[in-house]
């Protein structure tokens, strides 16, 4: 009886993780197209949320000129062919501005 409960709990967790990943990816697809070049960095982070990873420019894509940060948003539901939204932020006046967006597919 304990083994059944354990495996049922594991199956329920896997289903919940799949539903969460699908919901996350649909929300990312819907909001990523609303971002335009020149949007303030704060607005981008408000719409898209926290990135899966962020770091120095060139960590995931070719380094554009005057790049200050690179944000990577992962599509969690794409397990076998990972996909990412990659955003590049450049300094602009007093604040940083979103300058580019690309969908990258991992070649792994």
Image (cartoon, helix red, strand yellow):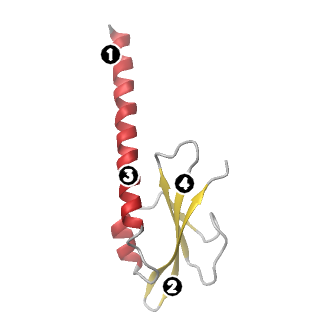
**Furthest residue to the top?**
1
Q: CA distance from mark 3 to mark 1?
A: 28 Å
Mark 2 or mark 1, earlier in chain: 1
Circle 3 SS class:
helix
Mark 2 or mark 3, earlier in chain: 3
**Mark in the foreground, 4 or 2:** 4
- Tell me residue 3's x, y (percent): 38, 11
Q: CA distance from mark 1 to mark 4?
A: 35 Å
Q: Quickly name the residue at label 1.
A: 5
Mark 3 or mark 1, earlier in chain: 1
In this view, the residue in front, 57 or 86, is 86
Residue at point 48%, 52% (across, down): 75
Mark 1 or mark 4, earlier in chain: 1
In this view, the residue in front, 88 or 25, is 25
Circle 1 SS class:
helix
Mark 2 crowd level (few <14, some 14–19, many ≥20, 10 Å Cα)? some
Residue at point 33%, 69% (across, down): 46
**Mark in the foreground, 2 or 3:** 3
- Tell me residue 50's x, y (percent): 40, 61
Q: CA distance from mark 3 to mark 4?
A: 13 Å
The disc at residue 24 is: 3
Residue at point 42%, 66% (across, down): 32
Q: CA distance from mark 2 to mark 1?
A: 54 Å
Q: CA distance from mark 4 to mark 2?
A: 26 Å
Q: Is residue 49 visible?
A: no
Circle 4 SS class:
strand
- Tell me residue 98's x, y (percent): 47, 78
Circle 2 SS class:
strand
Q: Quickly name the residue at label 2.
A: 91
The disc at residue 83 is: 4
**Mark in the foreground, 1 or 4:** 4
């Amino acid at each position: 009886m304990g083994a059944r409960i354990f495996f049922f709990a594991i199956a329920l967790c896997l289903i919940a993780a799949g539903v969460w990943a699908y919901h996350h990816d649909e929300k990312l697809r819907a909001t990523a197209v609303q971002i335009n070049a020149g949007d303030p960095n704060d607005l981008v982070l408000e719409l898209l949320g926290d990135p899966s990873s962020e770091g120095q420019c060139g960590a995931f894509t070719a380094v554009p000129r005057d790049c200050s940060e690179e944000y990577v948003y992962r599509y969690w539901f794409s397990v076998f062919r990972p996909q990412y939204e990659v955003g590049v932020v450049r300094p602009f006046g007093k604040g940083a501005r979103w300058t580019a967006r690309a969908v990258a597919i991992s070649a792994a």
